[in-house]
Amino acid sequence: MTALERAASIEDLRQIARRRIPRFAFDLVDGGAESERNLRRNSEAFEEVELTPRYMVDVSEIDTRTTLFGTNYALPFAMAPIGMLNAFWPDADLTLARLCKRENIPYVASSASSTTLERLAEAAEGNGWFQLYVSSDPSVTDGLIARAEAADYEVMMVTADVPAAGKRDRDIRNQLAVPFRFTPEVVVQCALNPTWALTSLRHGTPNVANYADLLQQATSYAEVQKTLITPGFSWESLKELRARWRGKLLVKGILHHDDAVRCAEIGCDGIVVSNHGGRQVAFGPATADVLPAIAGAVAGRMSVLVDSGIRRGADLIRAKALGADFAMTGRALAYGVGAGGNAGAERAMEILKLELVRALGQLGAPSINAVGPADLTRPPQGA
Ligand SMILES: Cc1cc2nc3c(=O)[nH]c(=O)nc-3n(C[C@H](O)[C@H](O)[C@H](O)COP(=O)(O)O)c2cc1C
């Protein structure tokens, strides 16, 4: 039996990934902001949500299919956008985009991906969505949107929760830099993880592919960040985006119910209740804690998605019970790729699916669509 076959959970895959990836690259994905309190709270908060099983329901057939924006998906979650993921494992972006197509779930290509948005659209074959970071330079933002349109993305997700880059202590200690630099410590860590190093060498230095030309001219990390994000992204900017983008528009990074209501008023098609997987701040709420109030505030007006901390199939059910229409996971599938490339990503997907189907049966819910607040043991606070 291989290590991948023996892996029983996403946490097991994370441990395998940790052993075969240099620390600086593992921390890049695994780490969170400052004390990492928010990162830890995310999965804890999901785990604390109790669902009460009902028995003597015929669950011989379990249906995990979900419709979102008029499209049928096989499972109730998407692969969340992750930047620079090829640093974690070479070709991780393409591996996951193809996997999402095979499994018929959405794949969200990040503005900061290490493979171009055009190649990812091709790999995801219609299952691709595009995530936009609004740049401080309007021509950069315009260029990305025009490319996303030309590549036939129909869903765009604009990320709102990065008015400033997150302070991630692990990355600072590891002296992580974009564009990537080979410091002496990095070289030592690579030597200790030869499979990663050799595979990475074959695939070339990981980059932020959509901005490759611009970044080559950058002279400092501060300049790179200015190209990627802006503290000036405002409700006015969101209105302009809404007028500009003809497809479905989602806002990612909503934590306050008032912000959710404003997104609905502006005519957005959905929001993602997200704290960026605990990578932005350590002081914020876990998404499972704020989701019920947000879902209640915009019920029936737009789609509500949630991410940050989903590590189990049962978390997908909890998300639904707390009021979400759909979920996303970032690290769960990323750990899979890190643990074993394509085979590892497939194993992560298999674990999530098996857990989801089993938990639905045990809850007495033959379909994910039948899950709702009535399955919660206790009414959520603030809903
Ligand atoms: C390494 C890493 C890079 C990320 N890059 C982006 C990004 O480029 N754009 C974005 O909107 N979110 C980004 N995110 C946040 C994810 O889209 C998602 O919100 C988060 O991973 C969900 O939490 P989870 O990892 O606990 O599932 C990133 C997350 C990680 C772990």
Image: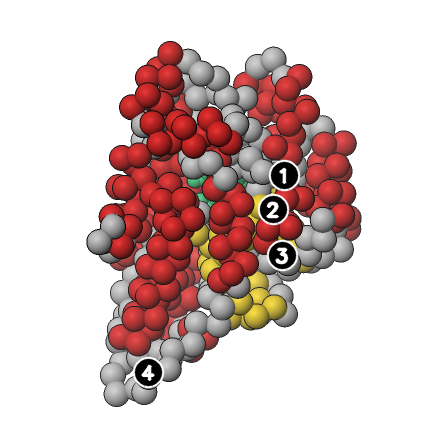
Amino acid type for the residue under numbered disc 4: Val
| Residue that badge 2 annotates | 120
x, y (%) of residue 140?
72, 32
Q: Is residue 156 above or below residue 297?
A: above
Neighbourhood count class around disc 1 (C-alpha, 10 Å): few under 14, some 14–19, many 20 upward: many
Q: Nearer the viewer, mark 4 or mark 2?
A: 2
CA gap, disc 1 to disc 2? Answer: 6 Å
Q: Are marks 1 and 2 in contact (CB under 8 Å)?
A: yes
Neighbourhood count class around disc 3 (C-alpha, 10 Å): few under 14, some 14–19, many 20 upward: some
x, y (%) of residue 135?
66, 32
x, y (%) of residue 187?
37, 17
x, y (%) of residue 244?
77, 48
| Residue that badge 4 annotates | 59
| Residue that badge 3 annotates | 125
Along the horizontal axis of the image, is 119 left or right of 164? right
| Residue that badge 1 annotates | 116
Upstream in the sequence, badge 4 or badge 2? 4
Secondary structure beneath label 1: loop
Q: Residue at x 75, y 36 (%)?
A: 143
CA gap, disc 2 to disc 3? Answer: 8 Å
Upstream in the sequence, badge 2 or badge 3? 2
